[in-house]
Image: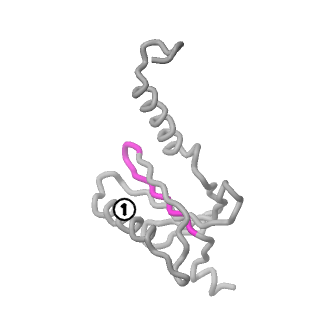
Amino acid sequence: LRAGERGVPAGARSLAQMFAKLSSLVSGVSLPFSLGESRGAVWNWWTLYDGKWKQDGASVSVFKAVIPVGDNTKLALARNSLKRLRGLKHPSIVSFKDSLESADRSNVTFYIVTERVMTLASFLAM
């Protein structure tokens, strides 16, 4: 123990710090982006939002899905899709920036952050 730290083992402190950081991510306090206007539903249960990357203020798109904890099929599909998207690097495929998965008692929320995109319906309406 260090001086002034009464009876708290170092491992417990680091575990508490890790939990505090994780809690802030889950609560939305430390998201690396801010959500803007919703652009509507895309791909079944995913919703598209405009967003801003906090680090440099760049415009991004955020895909958000809220899936019930008990829906193992959708959860597996979302996790597998995220895993595959992270690994794709091609000039004709949307550029992946970041992702986040957070859970509460009843839902798991997925966020996928990409370069700014436009839905086909929005493009055709121009």
Q: Nearer the viewer, residue 24 or 88?
A: 88
Task: Determine crowd level at label 1: few under 14, some 14-19, many 20+ residues with C-alpha closer than 10 A.
Answer: few
* Residue that label 1 marks: 79
Q: Quadrant of residue 12?
A: top left
Task: Name the main secondary structure of what is drawn in magenta.
Answer: strand
Q: Position of residue 25 (x, y in %)?
A: 52, 45
Amino acid found under the numbered disc labelled 1: Arg
At 29% from the left edge and 53% from the top edge, which residue is drawn?
70
Q: Is residue 28 above or below residue 123?
A: above
Position of 83 compared to 90: left or right?
left
Label 1's element? helix
Q: Position of residue 33 (x, y in %)?
A: 61, 55
Q: Is residue 47 above or below residue 8?
A: below
Q: Quadrant of residue 74?
A: bottom left
**Magenta residues, start to end:** 104-114
Q: Is residue 116 above or below residue 104?
A: below
Model colouring: one colour
Q: Position of residue 123 (x, y in %)?
A: 63, 83
Outermost residue to the front:
2
Position of 68 compared to 58: left or right?
left
- Which part of the image, by quadrant, shows the N terminus? top left
Position of 94 compared to 71: left or right?
right
- Which part of the image, by quadrant, shows the C terminus? bottom right
Total marks shown come to 1
At 63% from the left edge and 80% from the top edge, which residue is drawn?
122
Q: Nearer the viewer, residue 5 or 120?
A: 5
Q: Is residue 47 magenta?
A: no
Q: Nearer the viewer, residue 1 or 74?
A: 1
Q: Is residue 110 magenta?
A: yes
